[in-house]
Image (tube, rainbow, N blue to C red):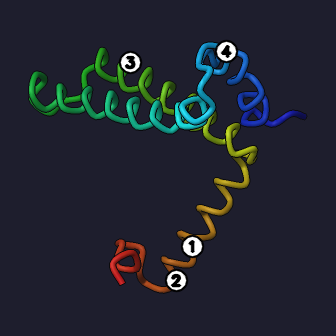
């Protein structure tokens, strides 16, 4: 059975117009990372509106917006995986191992990064 992450990783480049429309190799290589940051910003913008306009309550409409933006974040994250030619599973597993180790060391709160 095919893994949904592998299937999505193969799907992403079929919808990546920047691969066809941006000729400059450096810009084309940077594009998915810049896009990921932009989509993360859009996700935070929805969160801002929850606090500003909705009294801090997640409304059904805002939930839909958050889900939509998370989908866009996922697309760009997967485009980054594709650009690095790395499987999303390996990134997830590496991150899990890093966090397990930090939890065992008692540095899960981020102190490790400050040392």
Q: How many marks?
A: 4
- Of badges 4 and 2, nearer the viewer stands 4
Q: What mark, if any, has residue 80 been given in the picture?
A: none
Mark 1: few/some/many CA within 10 Å (<14, 14-19, 20+) = some
Mark 3–mark 1 CB contact (< 8 Å):
no
Alpha-carbon distance for marks 4 and 3?
30 Å
| Residue holding disc 4 | 20
Residue occupying image coordinates x 10% and y 22% = 53
| Residue holding disc 3 | 64
Alpha-carbon distance for marks 3 and 2?
36 Å
Residue occupying image coordinates x 58% and y 36% = 26
- Rendered location of residue 99, percent (x, y): 53, 69
Alpha-carbon distance for marks 2 and 1?
6 Å
Mark 2–mark 1 CB contact (< 8 Å):
yes
Alpha-carbon distance for marks 3 and 1?
32 Å
81, 3: nearer the viewer: 81
- Rendered location of residue 96, percent (x, y): 60, 63
Q: Secondary structure at mark 3?
A: helix
Mark 2: few/some/many CA within 10 Å (<14, 14-19, 20+) = few
- Of badges 4 and 1, nearer the viewer stands 4
Mark 4: few/some/many CA within 10 Å (<14, 14-19, 20+) = few
Image quadrant where one finds the C terminus: bottom left
Residue occupying image coordinates x 62% and y 20% = 23
From the viewer's perspective, is 67 left or right of 46?
right
Image quadrant where one finds the N terminus: top right
| Residue holding disc 1 | 100
Which numbered disc, 4 or 1, marks the residue that appears first in the sequence?
4
Which numbered disc, 3 or 2, marks the residue that appears first in the sequence?
3
Q: In this picture, is 111 found above or below 41?
A: below
Q: What mark, if any, has residue 104 been given in the picture?
A: 2
Which numbered disc, 4 or 3, marks the residue that appears first in the sequence?
4
Alpha-carbon distance for marks 4 and 2?
46 Å
């Amino acid at each position: 059975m095919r893994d949904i992450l592998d299937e999505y990783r193969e799907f992403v480049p079929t919808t990546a117009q920047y691969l066809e429309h941006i000729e400059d190799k450096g810009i084309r290589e940077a594009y998915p990372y810049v896009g990921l940051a932009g989509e993360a910003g859009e996700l935070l913008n929805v969160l801002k509106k929850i606090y500003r306009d909705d009294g801090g309550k997640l409304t059904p409409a805002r939930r839909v917006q958050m889900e939509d933006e998370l989908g866009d974040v996922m697309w760009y994250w997967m485009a980054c995986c594709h650009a690095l030619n790395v499987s999303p599973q390996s990134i997830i597993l590496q991150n899990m191992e890093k966090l397990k180790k930090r939890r065992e060391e008692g540095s899960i709160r981020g102190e490790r990064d400050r040392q």
